[in-house]
Amino acid sequence: MVLNHSQNASTLPRILIVDDHEQNVELLEAYLEEVRATVTSASDGLAALKQIESQAPDLILLDVMMPKMSGFQVAQKLRASAATREIPIIMVTALGEVSDMQRAEDLGITDYLTKPVNKVDLLNRVRAVLKQ
């Protein structure tokens, strides 16, 4: 989905939303309409890794609790590869325990947001990562 039609899609930053709940994806997509970016989504960790392999995004919004592979497992795989190690990841999750946040920090997660997500907070963090 290209969110700004006045620019060539190839010059826009790419954001990948990874969440197994369609309602969460739709909400994040709606929030991100204010950001000049191309937004795609994946419904689980394995699908996300395949998408990232074919075209690395500039930012990943990653849920933790998903079938097949958790967000922590996805992040661990991404951080283990030189090709994907530097992609910024913002965890967007219902998990708000200090231990979960510490685990994310240990994995090199760029930022951590708990659900329900505040739109202004999300936009500020996304823009800071993308430097828009």
Image: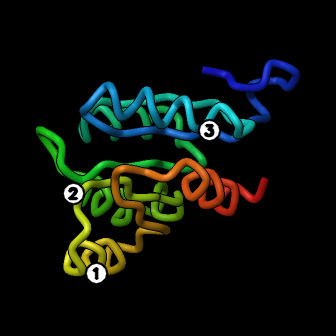
The residue lying toward the viewer, choosing from 99 and 117, is 117
**Is 76 located above or below residue 16 in the figure?**
below
Q: Position of residue 54 (x, y in %)?
A: 47, 32
Indicate left or right for 120 with 75 as reference: right
Q: Residue at x 77, y 25 (%)?
A: 4
Here the colouring is: rainbow
Q: Residue at x 31, y 25 (%)?
A: 22
Callout 1 touching callout 2 (CB < 8 Å): no
Q: Secondary structure at mark 1?
A: helix
Q: Label 1, label 2: how many angstroms apart (C-alpha)?
A: 15 Å
Closer to the chain start, of discs 1 and 2, is: 2
Q: Which mark is residue 117?
A: none
Indicate left or right for 22 with 6 as reference: left
Which corner quadrant of the image does residue 39 belong to? top right
Indicate left or right for 8 with 26 as reference: right
Closer to the chain start, of discs 3 and 2, is: 3
Of marks 1 and 2, the one in the foreground? 1
Which corner quadrant of the image does residue 112 belong to? bottom left
Q: Which mark is residue 14?
A: 3
- Report the residue that reaches farthest toward the left: 68
Q: Residue at x 38, y 58 (%)?
A: 91
The residue lying toward the viewer, choosing from 63 and 28, is 28
Closer to the chain start, of discs 1 and 3, is: 3
Of the residues shown, which amino acid type is indicated by label 3? Arg
Q: Position of residue 60 (x, y in %)?
A: 47, 48
**Residue pointed to by mark 2:** 73
**Residue pointed to by mark 1:** 102
